Image: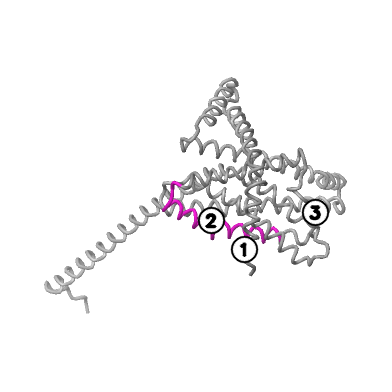
Amino acid sequence: MGVQPLSDGVRGVVEVCGAGFAETWRVKLSGLLALLDDVAAIAKVAASSVDDIATAAAKAGSKTAMVAIDDAAVTPKYVVGFSADRELPIIWKIARGSLFNKLVVLLPAALLLASFAPGLIQPLLMLGGAYLCFEGAEKVYHAWAPHGDYEAEPSGQGHDPAHLEETKVSGAVKTDFILSAEIMAIALSTVAGGSLWAQTATLALIGVGMTALVYGGVAVLVKLDDIGLHLARTARWAATRRFGTGLVWFMPVLMQVLSVVGTAAMLWVGGSIVLHGLEVTHVWAAPYLAIHHLAEAAGQAVPAAAGFVAWAVGAMLDGVLGLAIGLVLIPLATKVLGPALQRLKGARPAQ
């Protein structure tokens, strides 16, 4: 029995249904393509935002790098006197405290400041810069004329090791708070004026990145002597054993170099922040402008390395003035502010 041809009525129904089916899928396909186009546009905007955040984070990170160097130079002293198996756990505890400082305390405070009191950002930044000058000048003054402000820390004899460890970690986290506050303030000054989302993401990226950089570097530093000792004792080849011995010998030198670089960085960054703040706030622009002109003139005198020479001269002059600012602040801090704080503590009622 052959296939019967469709009647005109049936053929009409099929054609109508087919046309409706095609139109339905055409509409759905058009909607899908429009949706994909919207998704692509959103992704493009998001990628642009991420790129802007990464650029802002890189710019802010370059400005905070010198503070991070000082942080890395200071931290290893907190693991001195502990067994090798406790070094990395102690550093991890300090790193967690640093992340808490940056992300839980300082980041929200910075965002609130940027939203409700942006005029305070520069004065607080200058206050942090003055603190860096003070700390750097104290280190220089102590190296030149040792005094009672840098008494040796207790060795821990007669104390529970766990209690001593917690004390060391607590002291390190408190020190980190000051440096973290300066890092976040510098980063905030770089992204001020951006959207809340961009500011939050940039500050969070800076906080996590700087913490990983500093304490990851510290972890490597404090274990290098153990690595060198292991190589010196167990390496198969004589050259490797000699390398291990050299590494053990070199570590104290490296730590001393880091300490000097960290002190110089504190004075340079602190001096630069204070002088730039004085210029921005129109309080006293002359020192900042004079250093800027001297650095430019020095760079023009050496065309082959103009950029580096200008930077080096500017950083050196910022550091010299930072040292001068810090030396002026030492008696103020030790003779006025310190005793005042002690009196306030003594005046508090006993708990």
Q: Nearer the viewer, mark 3 or mark 2?
A: 2
- Tell me how far mark 3 sits from mark 2, CA to CA: 35 Å
Residue type at numbered disc 1: Arg
| 1 and 3 marks in contact (CB < 8 Å) | no
Q: Residue at x 12, y 73 (%)?
A: 9
- Which of the labelled discs sits on residue 348, or is there none? 1
**Which of 163 and 93 lies nearest the eye of the viewer?**
163
- Tell me how far mark 1 sits from mark 3, CA to CA: 47 Å
Query: Does the magenta-highlighted stretch encompass residue 256?
Result: no
Percent x, y of residue 281: 46, 38
Which badge, 2 or 1, comes first in the chain's sequence? 2
- Element at badge 3? helix
Percent x, y of residue 82: 79, 59
**Segment tinted magenta in the rendering:** 90-119
Looking at the image, residue 215 sits to the left or right of residue 196; the answer is right
- Element at badge 1? loop
Label 2 sits on residue: 106
Label 3 sits on residue: 226
Q: Residue at x 33, y 56 (%)?
A: 38
Residue type at numbered disc 2: Leu
